[in-house]
Image: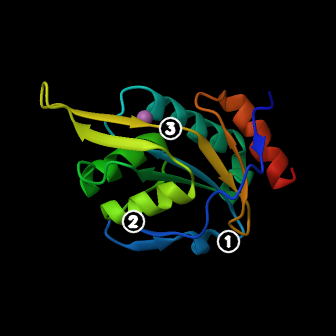
Amino acid sequence: MDDLMWNRGPIGGPFTLTNSNGQRRSSSEFRGKLMVIYFGYTSCPDVCPTDLMAIAQAIDALGADGGAVQPIFITIDPGRDTPEQLTRYAAAFHPRLIALTGSDDEIRSVATAFKVYYTVARDPRDGEVRVDHSGVIYLMGREGEYLGFMPPQTDPARLTEILRKQLGK
Ligand code: NI
């Protein structure tokens, strides 16, 4: 199976959400760049950090060309991921990683457009919040169009290779 699942669309579409400083940010701002988009939540124990680390490493491995790639993290747990947490979390992975949040409805609508599955629910048995989510790495093109996705835990070197190819380098 190819690492990059091409054009199983329609996936994605324009979005406007709020960054951790409270500013509204739109996907259209990143025209001309590739966007790497990841949906997750800051207290995710393993998959999210692994994938965000891989994204950061892949972008750094591109050197100066990495500037043409915009990494974006969208929380699927906006009720618990505070702006402060999102700021700290994003900075821990990459200085250019933008963390976005929004109202429950906004997040639901962007996630639906990207065919992201998630649930955030309090377990009545122990009162703990349980989060379940799909964790694929989306790659969007210079016009914001969907290019494909990489599965969770894609190797950073493979991710670098895919990004380099898409950048035409
Ligand atoms: Ni996760």
Categorize mark 1 by other alpha carbons within 10 Å: few (<14), some (14-19), many (20+). some
Disc 3 is placed on an element classified as: loop
The mark found on residue 4 in the picture is none
Considering only order in the chain, which callout, 1 or 3, is on the residue closer to the N terminus? 1
Q: Are marks 2 and 1 in contact (CB under 8 Å)?
A: no
Q: Is 140 positioned to the left or the right of 106 in the image?
A: right
Question: For ligand 1, which image quadrant applies?
Answer: top left
Between residue 104 and residue 70, name the one nearer to us: 104
Q: Is residue 40 visible?
A: yes
**In the shown orientation, is residue 18 left or right of residue 127?**
right
Q: Amino acid at mark 1?
A: Arg
The residue tagged 3 is: 134
Q: In front: mark 3 or mark 1? A: 3
- Please tell me which residue lies in front, 124 or 101: 124
Q: Does any portion of residue 41 appear in the rendered image?
A: no
The image shows residue 67 at horizontal and vertical percentages of: 66, 57
Front tag of 2 and 1: 2
